[in-house]
Image (cartoon, grey):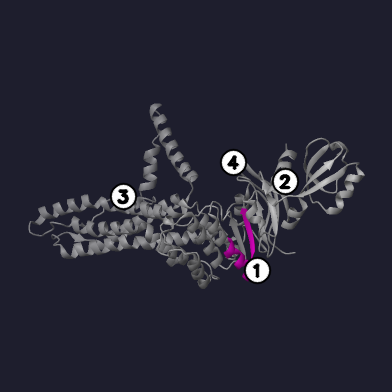
């Protein structure tokens, strides 16, 4: 498998915040969701990936090139939408498009014009006068018209109304299907990523909690109702990952487990317990349980 | 690339550039008002005095133009925390050069205005015998002063708040040491020494000092 982004043992520090031994592997052509609560380090990691910040240690490769050393060569092939709109507020929409086009040899004018029309952006309006949704649409327009092989999107739909979110996500999906591009998208809106991501990484407190295919995270995270469960010290080695367990009513317990497979029910017979029910969790529940168990393990 | 950077900088700096051009054009013409050869040596002395007093405004205008255009050059990038600039696909040194070059191009307006104003003033005025106009020399000196001021303030404005803090801290420390030395009766003249080093030839700001005369003997 080839990777659009490879990050290994990445370390970074800014004040009291620290990224510690971050490993990420974004497969080429995938839509890779980067989940985590606010302040978990998603934006910092993305900025490191793009060479905007310099790491203390570790290796970053983007589209086969080392970052930040090969920054300009890589950035010519990457569309980036930052968390906060950062464009010159004194320029109009048309002037910003002209400005951006001058820097990208792959700039596709027809795509820019098409998106300008579809997003209903007034090209004469100053950037400062655009609404939040219009700013987000313009940022997406710029990223897509660059025709990059990789899109790095830092919470691009955060705080937007559902209609604008739908427009933006539709444009992104259309772009990916046409260009076979890779998308590396961060969000704390779990349900949003659930719908279209192939892979997902979860980050918390500057560390990567997990990095798995989306289906595996969705299908493998379950709530089990267990009757007659042995105490924690006598459960032995489980074939699945126990994220949390808590007493329900009577002799039953609720276990949240990861990497679950149906044939693992045999484990409970082996330890003298019985599995009463297996309940599917949506990604949001799975995400919350993952974070809870990660934080509990770290004390 | 240069064209779009120049355009964006023009949008932020146009008021400064237009006002600077008008001032640069008007200054030599105003300084030559009342020049005539009718009253001989007396008129020559008056004209020299007027040229000298108006001449103090040239370095002030040059410094102000350099400062304001330099600040305007980086203003949008600072507001956007340099994120947009850093994600553009070109080496950082090249981006800085493009920004610097665009600022210099915009400053060419006021520089040319001084050339035009100075030439027009010396051509149209009646310069008393014994005096001579130096429009090109004055305009050239003005251009160099503008470039020096712009380069210095461009470099300072390019930095972060931390860089500005370090520079201000160094100046503050210098003043503090000077005050302490004065209080302790120590024979130390840091400020004077610094002035000599910076303002006397070949100091970087020597171009701002001395007499700025459009007409002279």
- Location of mark 2 (residue): A290
Magenta range is: A169-186
- Residue A292 picture quarter: top right
User: In percent of the image, x 36 and y 57: which residue is there?
Assistant: B13
Q: Position of residue B172 (x, y in %)?
A: 43, 37
Instruction: Tally the numbered discs.
Output: 4
Q: Is residue B2 above or below residue B71?
A: below
Marks 4, 1: nearer the viewer: 1
Q: Main secondary structure of the magenta part?
A: helix
Checking the image for residue B209, the label placed there is 3
Task: Say if labels 4 and 2 share a chain.
Answer: yes
Q: Which residue is mark 4?
A: A15
Same-chain check, marks 4 and 1: yes
Residues packed near mark 2 inside 10 Å, few (<14), some (14 to 19) or many (20 plus)? many
Dot 1 falls on which chain? A
Give me the residue at 87% from left, 44% from top.
Answer: A274
Q: A205 and B217: which one is in front?
A: A205
Toward the viewer: B27 or B203?
A: B27
- The residue mark sitting in front, 4 or 2, is 2
Question: Which residue does the image show at 58% across and 54% down from the upper left?
Answer: A155
- Label 4: chain letter: A
Q: For the C terminus of chain A, which image quadrant?
A: top right
What separation in Å lies between label 2 and label 1 (alpha carbons)?
31 Å
Q: Earlier in the sequence, mark 4 or mark 1?
A: 4
Which residue is identified by label 1? A180
Q: Is residue B48 located in the magenta-colored stretch of the structure?
A: no
Query: Disc 4 to disc 2, how far (Cα)?
Result: 27 Å
Give the mark nearest the N terminus, 2 or 1. 1
């Amino acid at each position: 498998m080839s990777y659009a982004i490879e990050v290994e043992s990445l370390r970074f520090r800014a004040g009291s915040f620290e990224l510690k031994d971050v490993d990420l592997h974004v497969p080429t052509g995938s839509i890779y969701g980067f989940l985590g609560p606010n302040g978990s380090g998603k934006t910092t990691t993305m900025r490191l990936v793009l060479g905007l910040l310099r790491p203390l240690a570790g290796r970053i490769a983007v589209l086969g090139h080392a970052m930040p050393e090969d920054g300009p060569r890589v950035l010519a092939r990457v569309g980036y939408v930052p968390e906060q709109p950062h464009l010159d507020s004194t320029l109009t929409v048309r002037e910003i498009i002209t400005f951006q086009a001058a820097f990208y040899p792959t700039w596709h004018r027809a795509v820019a014009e098409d998106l300008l029309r579809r997003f209903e952006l007034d090209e004469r309006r100053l950037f400062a006068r655009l609404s939040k949704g219009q700013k987000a649409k313009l940022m997406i327009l710029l990223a897509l018209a660059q025709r990059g092989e990789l899109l790095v999107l830092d919470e691009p739909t955060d705080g937007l109304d559902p209609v604008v979110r739908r427009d933006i996500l539709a444009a992104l999906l259309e772009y990916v299907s046409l260009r076979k591009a890779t998308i590396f998208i961060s969000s704390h809106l779990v349900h949003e990523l659930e719908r279209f991501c192939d892979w997902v990484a979860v980050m918390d407190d500057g560390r990567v909690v997990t990095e798995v295919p989306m289906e595996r995270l969705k299908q493998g995270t379950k709530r089990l109702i267990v009757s007659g469960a042995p105490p924690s010290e006598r459960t032995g080695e489980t074939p699945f990952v126990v994220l949390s367990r808590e007493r329900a009513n009577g002799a039953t317990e609720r276990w949240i487990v990861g990497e679950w497979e149906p044939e693992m029910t045999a484990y409970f017979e082996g330890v003298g317990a019985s599995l009463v029910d297996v309940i599917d969790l949506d990604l949001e529940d799975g995400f919350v349980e993952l974070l809870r168990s990660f934080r509990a393990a770290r004390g | 690339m240069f064209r779009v950077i120049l355009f964006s900088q023009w949008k932020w700096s146009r008021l400064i550039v237009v006002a600077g051009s008008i001032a640069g054009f008007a200054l030599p013409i105003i300084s030559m008002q009342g020049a005539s050869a009718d009253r001989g040596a007396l008129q020559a002395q008056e004209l020299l005095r007027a040229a000298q007093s108006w001449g103090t405004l040239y370095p002030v205008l040059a410094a102000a133009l350099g400062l304001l255009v330099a600040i305007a050059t980086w203003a949008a990038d600072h507001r956007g925390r340099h994120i947009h600039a850093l994600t553009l696909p070109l080496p950082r040194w090249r981006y800085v050069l493009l920004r610097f070059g665009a600022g210099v191009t915009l400053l060419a307006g006021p520089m040319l205005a001084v050339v035009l104003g100075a030439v027009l003033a010396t051509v149209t005025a009646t310069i008393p015998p014994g005096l001579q106009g130096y429009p090109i020399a004055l305009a050239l000196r003005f251009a160099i002063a503008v470039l020096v001021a712009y380069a210095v303030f461009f470099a300072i404005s390019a930095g972060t708040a931390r860089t500005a803090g370090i520079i201000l801290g160094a100046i503050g420390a210098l003043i503090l040491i000077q005050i302490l030395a004065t209080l302790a009766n120590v024979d130390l003249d840091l400020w004077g020494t610094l002035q000599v080093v910076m303002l006397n030839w070949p100091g970087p700001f020597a171009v701002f000092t001395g007499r700025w005369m459009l007409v002279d003997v």
